[in-house]
């Protein structure tokens, strides 16, 4: 901005301390409203009428779409005065005023809307960002009420561990179908997240502290509810890393949960496991090597 313009017409000051922010309404043509709605237009230009000069930094501006009647609210972050539209457009970033137009077309549009007598009052640039001005509407129901309207899920976290030759290590369950499992379990301790659950369960199930350095998430697993499982289940499988031969020798199983651990290559695991269960191992391996999506959906 040229120094003489900036000195001759100073920016509108903020309201004095203790003044309550005011609410102002401005109507926009549909295309300009959609630019604001999309977060692309962040400066509105108006002539400096007494009504517009009453707007202060920190005030609320409610924009109304002339085409649909929709409205949205913003907080005024800056107000700068200019002697003319031409001065304004030479100083402001015109892409913030009209991201789809050119400076020349924008000047013609402004002068097509406002006659010269109006422009002689001066021009104002109202800058705003994406912060809301008004409080949000009350939720239609309480969190507890909403929780009763949606399907419930369980969540598990586990660690995918391998030996020094990158072969998966699994534990054999003593329950139900005697599934081969990774160290981990369901989130049933208040305050834990899935990784913390996996780390705690690994200690309980193997006697080893594993995955203590915030390991990489390898796979997100969604298991649909079915006859054997009344709730959907979401699982997060983290990379527990490679175990040395010494670490493997120190595995101590909890007999209340597992009675065997084993190390096999993928081909052997595929022979030992049901197809649905092996699909998770296969998905983890493909995701770990960047060969497939890190998201798996299975059905009971």
Image (cartoon, helix red, strand yellow):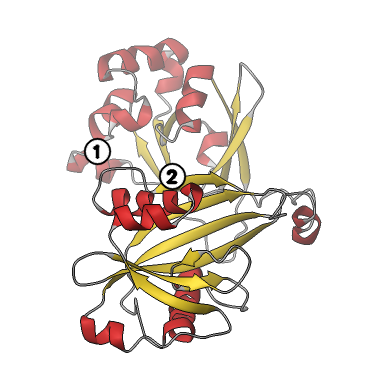
* Label 2 environment density (alpha carbons within 10 Å; few <14, some 14–19, many ≥20): some
Q: Quadrant of residue 124?
A: top left
Q: What whole-number distance in Å separates the C-alpha atoms at marks 1 and 2?
A: 25 Å
Position of 141 with respect to 237 (left or right) is right
Residue indicated by mark 2 = 129
In this view, the mark in front (1 or 2): 2
Q: Is residue 108 visible?
A: yes
The relative height of residue 28 versus residue 152 in the rendered view (above or below) is above
Which element is circle 1 on? Answer: helix
* Label 1 environment density (alpha carbons within 10 Å; few <14, some 14–19, many ≥20): some
Residue 148 placement (x, y as % from top left): 80, 55
Q: Is residue 48 visible?
A: no
Residue indicated by mark 1 = 5
Q: Can you say which quadrant of the picture contains the N terminus? A: top left
Whichever of callouts 1 and 2 sits on the residue coming sooner in the sequence is 1
User: Could you say which is closer to the camera, residue 159 or residue 254?
Assistant: 254
The numbered dot on residue 35 is none
Residue 253 placement (x, y as % from top left): 46, 85
- The image shows a total of numbered marks equal to 2
Give the residue drawn at x 53%, y 18%. Answer: 30
The relative height of residue 188 versus residue 60 in the rendered view (above or below) is below
Give the residue drawn at x 34%, y 32%. Answer: 96
Position of 244 with respect to 61 (left or right) is left
Residue 226 placement (x, y as % from top left): 69, 48
User: Could you say which is closer to the camera, residue 195 or residue 1?
Assistant: 195
Give the residue drawn at x 44%, y 85%. Answer: 203
Give the residue drawn at x 50%, y 48%. Answer: 276
User: Could you say which is closer to the camera, residue 256 or residue 48?
Assistant: 256
Residue 134 placement (x, y as % from top left): 63, 49
The relative height of residue 46 versus residue 174 in the rendered view (above or below) is above
Q: Quadrant of residue 158?
A: bottom left
Which element is circle 2 on? Answer: loop
């Amino acid at each position: 901005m040229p120094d003489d313009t900036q000195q001759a017409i100073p920016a509108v000051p903020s309201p004095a301390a203790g003044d309550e922010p005011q609410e102002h309404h401005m109507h926009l043509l549909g295309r300009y409203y959609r630019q604001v709605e999309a977060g692309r237009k962040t400066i509105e230009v108006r002539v400096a009428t007494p009504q517009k000069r009453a707007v202060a930094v920190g005030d609320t501006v409610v924009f109304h779409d002339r085409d649909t009647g929709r409205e949205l609210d913003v907080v005024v972050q800056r107000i700068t005065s200019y002697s003319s539209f031409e001065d304004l457009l030479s100083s402001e970033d015109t892409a913030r005023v009209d991201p789809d137009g050119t400076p020349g077309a924008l000047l013609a549009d402004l002068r097509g809307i406002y006659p010269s007598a109006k422009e002689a009052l001066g021009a104002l640039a109202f800058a705003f960002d994406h912060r809301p001005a008004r409080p949000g509407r009350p939720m239609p129901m309480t969190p507890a009420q909403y929780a009763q309207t949606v399907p419930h899920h369980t969540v598990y976290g586990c660690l995918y561990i391998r030996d020094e030759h990158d072969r998966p290590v699994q534990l054999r369950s003593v329950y139900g179908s005697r599934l081969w499992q990774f160290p981990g379990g369901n989130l049933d301790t208040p305050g834990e997240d899935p990784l913390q659950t996996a780390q705690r369960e690994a200690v309980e199930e193997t006697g080893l502290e594993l995955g203590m350095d915030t390991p990489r998430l390898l796979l997100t697993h969604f298991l649909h509810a079915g006859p054997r499982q009344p709730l959907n289940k979401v699982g997060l499988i983290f990379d527990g890393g490679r175990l040395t031969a010494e670490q493997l020798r120190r595995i101590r199983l909890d007999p209340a949960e597992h009675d065997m651990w084993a190390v096999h290559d993928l081909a052997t695991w595929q022979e030992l496991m049901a197809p649905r269960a092996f699909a998770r191992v296969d998905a983890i391996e493909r995701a770990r090597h960047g060969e497939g999506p890190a998201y798996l959906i299975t059905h009971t």
